[in-house]
């Protein structure tokens, strides 16, 4: 399993640490034996995490064409939830009990933070008088299956419209 290591400054590195638990670790850099001897040449602390962010947008499909490439405005204040879905059947393992719930912000953006590696389903609630015209994951059912592996997941977008074609 890959773990993300975030350097305490602005740098970000990724290393492979099999089965290491999350936490903060001190790493030591040493000179290669035979070059200048074996000496510690630096020390730094890193946070190891196997949790990632999942994000997307809910947009107002004004023309109702379902085209995700259109630059439609975002819908603010909508509820979006992420549920564990281990078998990826689109049905939450714990219906009614999301892993996380959030509300869309400016531009219709939403983000779930610190999501562990695993399979999930994102469910968006349409605003009153709107219907779904598309989402990034067929079929168009207000659900997106997400497989969080070893990186943040972006672009999990939904389109809703009052003028569906």
Image (cartoon, helix red, strand yellow):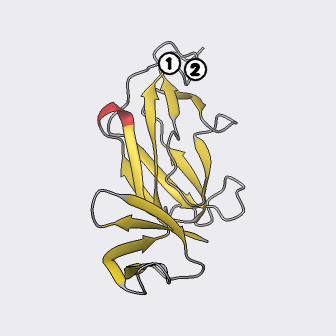
Q: Identify which residue, 16 or 65, lies in the foreground.
A: 16
Q: Identify which residue, 78 or 59, lies in the foreground.
A: 59
Q: Identify which residue, 164 or 159, lies in the foreground.
A: 159
Q: Are marks 2 and 1 in contact (CB under 8 Å)?
A: yes
Q: In the image, is 97 to the left or to the right of 144?
A: left
In percent of width and height, residue 100 lies at 43, 60
User: Which quarter of the figure has residue 74?
Assistant: top left
SS state under label 1: loop
Residue at the farthest bottom position:
38
In percent of width and height, residue 95 lies at 57, 62
Q: Residue at x 42, y 78 (%)?
A: 31
Q: Which mark is residue 27?
A: none
Where does the C terminus fall, quadrant-wise?
top right
- Dot 1: within a 10 Å radius of its alpha carbon, few (fewer than 14), some, or many (20 or more) residues? few
Q: Residue at x 56, y 66 (%)?
A: 117
Whether residue 49 is visible to the viewer of this picture, yes or no, is yes
Number of callouts in the render?
2
Where does the N terminus fall, quadrant-wise?
bottom right
Whether residue 99 is visible to the viewer of this picture, yes or no, is no
Residue at the farthest front position:
35
Q: In the image, is 98 to the left or to the right of 108?
A: right
Q: In the image, is 44 to the left or to the right of 79?
A: left
Q: Which mark is residue 67?
A: 2
Q: Which residue is mark 1?
A: 70
In percent of width and height, residue 135 lies at 58, 34
- Dot 2: within a 10 Å radius of its alpha carbon, few (fewer than 14), some, or many (20 or more) residues? some
Q: Residue at x 35, y 84 (%)?
A: 40
SS state under label 2: loop
In percent of width and height, residue 133 lies at 58, 25
Residue 74's place in the image compared with 52, above or below, is above
Disc 2 to disc 1, C-alpha distance: 6 Å
């Amino acid at each position: 399993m890959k773990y993300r290591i975030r350097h305490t400054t602005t740098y970000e590195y990724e290393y492979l640490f099999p089965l290491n638990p999350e936490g903060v670790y001190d790493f030591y850099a040493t000179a290669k034996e035979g070059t200048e001897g074996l000496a510690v040449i630096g020390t730094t602390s890193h946070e190891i995490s196997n949790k990632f962010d999942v994000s997307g947008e809910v947009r107002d499909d004004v023309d109702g064409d379902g085209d995700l490439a259109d630059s439609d405005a975002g819908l603010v204040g909508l509820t979006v939830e992420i549920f564990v879905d281990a078998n990826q059947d689109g049905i939450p393992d714990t219906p009614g009990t999301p892993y996380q719930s959030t509300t869309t912000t400016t531009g219709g953006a939403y983000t779930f933070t610190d999501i562990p590696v695993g399979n999930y389903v994102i469910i968006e609630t349409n605003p009153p008088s709107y219907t779904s015209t598309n989402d990034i994951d067929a079929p168009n059912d207000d659900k997106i299956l997400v497989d969080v592996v070893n990186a943040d997941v972006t672009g999990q977008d939904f389109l809703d419209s009052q003028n569906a074609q």
